[in-house]
Amino acid sequence: MRYLDEYRDPELARSLLDRLQQVATRPWRIMEVCGGQTHTLVRQGIDELLPAGIRMIHGPGCPVCVTPLETLDRAMAVAARPEVTFTSFGDMLRVPGTHTDLLSLRARGADVRVVYSPMDAVRIAVAESDRQVVSLAVGFETTAPANAMAVLHARRLGLANFSVLVSHVLVPPAMTALLADPDCEVQAFLAAGHVCAVMGWRQYEPIAARWRVPVVVTGFEPLDLLEGVLMAVEQLEAGRHVVENQYVRAVRRAGNRHAQQVVAEVFRVTDRTWRGIGPLPASGLELTPDYAAFDAARRFGVTDVRSAEHPECIAGAVLTGAREPTDCAAYGTRCTPRTPLGAPMVSAEGTCAAYHAAGRTPQGARHDEPVPHTTA
């Protein structure tokens, strides 16, 4: 961003906090649906600076964290094959599967490569025609256009040695599933600005109307988040429940129509299992029949992989905001960024990783001291 410092101005932050103190007359519970926003809130201590009674609930906004365990185990099975070059963004390499992770497979000789774009994987497939190149296509609506473009380009080039292992998920169905839970405490949402930059915010309007919850499309810097919280609280105090856009410098209501068209060409909506949460109907993307030839799960016969989460990990409760990382008995001891039991502790957008990096521990204990066990 060109003027990044402007969105971290401490005086402006204080004025927004003062305004929140004036506006808030009762407790409110607001969920941010983005792991990047979670890290900013925790790293900057914003969630602890908010007026008493305003509580931030950290939602399932980490795309790495919600990628189902079955997808990771399928990735390991494919990446271990001698004829395969497996490509992925770097943040997926240390996410634990049932028995191992991609980084460990690479250490044992598997051809696992970090790429910065799915198009890098296509270029590898062109350059190394004797290899089967597989791209791990995961994430929210934000990364779907790039993966769709890679598939389109591979078909135009007639590449028979390129395929994708798809596990895209969609934000609105997850929000609806959370609100449908009778134990849900969320009264307003901060929607992820990068998702809305692609999809716009029209999909959120029926959610706001049906469930009577304000939705504020928000950026990722401290002032973005403070203003987003203020806008949500102003709606709550006034009894309003509409979609508002704080992230005006990047998001429009209609989103990016070209990106949406590319996604619709290659993918279709499907049911998807979210790691730690379970199956959610119509909450993911899969290749359309026209592009099924690029489905790595079918090509390598790993569609029937079934997995089980680590019994001690409470990732599902953390991802839905029902628990905080420090509620976990393993947090900071048996589960650390070096020895993660679940994805939220190792992902760059995971809530557990954010808490650990900020030094947050149960009852003020240090990371190097025994952490009291709590009921998970």
Image (tube, grey):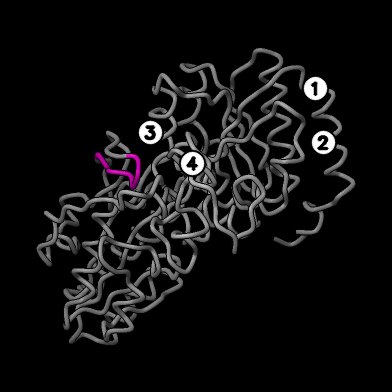
Residue at which label 1 appears: 23
Which comes before the other along the chain, label 4 or label 1? 1
Report the mark closest to the observer, 1 or 3.
Answer: 1
Query: Please, what is the three-letter code of the amino acid marked with disc 2?
Result: Leu
Residue 162 lies in the magenta stretch: no
Could you tell me how far apart the alpha carbons at marks 4 and 1 are, in whole angstroms? Answer: 36 Å
Name the residue at 21% across, 78% down.
84
Query: Please, what is the three-letter code of the amino acid marked with disc 4?
Result: Thr
Local crowd size for mark 3, using a 10 Å CA cut-off: few (<14), some (14–19), many (≥20): some
Local crowd size for mark 2, using a 10 Å CA cut-off: few (<14), some (14–19), many (≥20): many
Query: Please, what is the three-letter code of the amino acid marked with disc 1?
Result: Val
Residue at which label 2 appears: 17
Q: Where is 279 relative to 212, above or below? A: below
Which comes before the other along the chain, label 2 or label 3? 2
Q: Where is 188 relative to 260, above or below? A: above
Q: In this picture, which residue range is highlighted in magenta?
A: 271-277
Name the residue at 13% across, 61% down.
302
Query: Please, what is the three-letter code of the amino acid marked with disc 3?
Result: Pro
Which comes before the other along the chain, label 4 or label 3? 3
**How many circles with numbers are drawn on the protein?**
4
Residue at which label 4 appears: 374
- Find residue 173 and name its label: 3
Residue 190 rendering spot, x and y as whole percentages: 59, 36
Report the mark closest to the observer, 4 or 3.
Answer: 4
Could you tell me how far apart the alpha carbons at marks 2 and 1 are, in whole angstroms? Answer: 10 Å
Badge 4 vs badge 3, beta-carbon distance below 8 Å? no
Which comes before the other along the chain, label 1 or label 3? 1
Name the residue at 26% across, 82% down.
110
Which residue is nearer to you in this view: 200 or 318? Answer: 318
Q: Secondary structure at mark 1?
A: helix
Report the mark closest to the observer, 4 or 1.
Answer: 4
Badge 2 vs badge 3, beta-carbon distance below 8 Å? no
